[in-house]
Image (tube, helix red, strand yellow):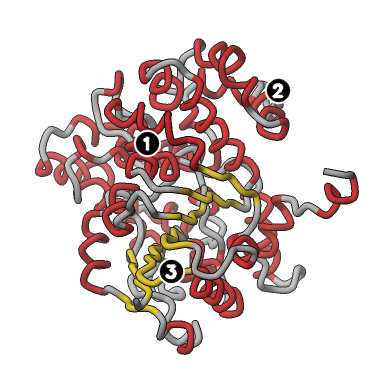
Amino acid sequence: MNIAAKVLEPTSVDLLSEAVHQNHALSPAGLLERTFTFAFRSMVYPQIWEDPRADMEALELTSQSRVVTIASGGCNVMSYLAANPAQIYAIDLNQTHIALLKLKLAAARHLPNHTTFYRFFGAADDRRNVQLYHDLVAPHLDAGARAYWEGRDITGRRRISRFARNFYRYGLLGRFIATGHLAARVFGANPKRMLEARTIEEQQDIFAREIAPAFDHPVLRWITSNRASLFGLGIPPVQYDALSGGGARPMADVLKERAHRLATGFDLKDNYFAWQAFGRRYAAGGAGPCPPYLDKENFLAIKTRTNRVTVIHDNMIRFLSNEPAGSLDRYVLLDAQDWMDDGALNALWSEITRTAQPGARVIFRTAGEATILPGRVSSAIVENWTYDAARSAEIHAKDRSAIYGGFHLYVKAS
């Protein structure tokens, strides 16, 4: 690529600004949006917070599936490979997420066995991981990804060393969870005790005794009333508003409700999201639940399919606009539409509709309970799609990530 082309290539800041900024820079809302953009350009999700098992059930992936998805922390992209799709296009605005997915792909391809791969991304707290990176993974990364992992963070340590010090404690999400644990202790709670539960009934009892009271503390209620308080969860101001019903409900009550579902809605032996939220790790020695890409039974399949993933630093609308009509059949939008204004929503669904094959499936999550398309996306576009409300509700009930208001499945008319 020549120098002129490099100058024109959008940066993470450019892409995030396109996605988030909806108000004048000097307005209160505009200042908040730009603060979020500044925070979001660094590592946000060491682990993606959407359940890939729920995704794959709704997507019904086949060996012919050509998937477009937002990359985020890369866990779900890697996990989808277990279902044997033909191609995955993983797109993200955030260059650090791009670097993380590239690291996972290269590690799956070049680490010798599941033991070393799990130690790297499952335990993520062993000094040997740094040496493995230099010996077996780094030579296979492109210059940008390698520069990121070998670069230094604000503490002066190389970023790759985070895999020797529990990688899941880093990023905005990792620090948000750490802050939540600290706040809980100040307010008299201990989230880690949740992991002592052996039954759903014990989970319910521990939540009621140890965690629920913290959400009623006046200081926590005041903190969470600030629209910037959830930046660590990757929630911009517009999504904060959706989560609180436009201010109709106190955010502390919403968070308490979602935390209750995370803590008690699923058996801890089957919910790695709860392990991360309450323990800041996966179960020791791989003795508990983990993302599908870290399961031993999936390792060889994922290892041999990594060449099916194309990683792209861009926004999804621009990517889709360059794809042929009728060339794709699975779309994973995560919760990104909560960020979008009506113009962006219509542009996105126009391109999805153009590129989608008959029978194509689109899944996404929302902070609120209802699908956000009716009344916002043109009826001329929406009429090409069938909203499967029953299946959406069924999958939402199975979604172990537990923090979203709704899961939504649309199927293109044949």
Front tag of 2 and 3: 3
Question: In this orientation, does residue 190 appear?
Answer: no
Three-letter code, disc 3: Gln
**First in residue order: circle 2 vs circle 3:** 2
For the point 72% across and 72% down, the residue is 27
Q: How many marks?
A: 3
Q: Amino acid at mark 1?
A: Arg
Q: Nearer the viewer, mark 1 or mark 3?
A: 3
- View extreme (right): residue: 4
Quadrant location of the C terminus?
bottom left
From the image, state whether disc 1 or disc 2 is nearer to you. 2
- Reading the image, the residue beneath label 3 is 357
The local crowd at label 3, few if under 14, some if 14 to 19, many if 20 or more residues have their Cα within 10 Å, is some
Residue 165's label in the rendered image is: none
Residue 247 coordinates in the image, percent (x, y): 45, 73
Label 1 vs 3, first from the N-terminus: 1
Classify residue 47 as left or right of residue 62: right
Residue 60, above or below 127: below
Q: Which mark is residue 156?
A: 2
Q: Looking at numbered disc 2 in the image, what kind of residue is underneath it? A: Gly
Judging depth in this view, the residue of 333 and 44 nearest the camera is 333
340 left or right, relative to 4: left
Q: Residues within 10 Å of mark 1 (few under 14, many from 20)?
A: some
Which residue is under mark 1? 185
Mark 2 burial class by Cα count in 10 Å: few <14, some 14-19, many 20+:
few
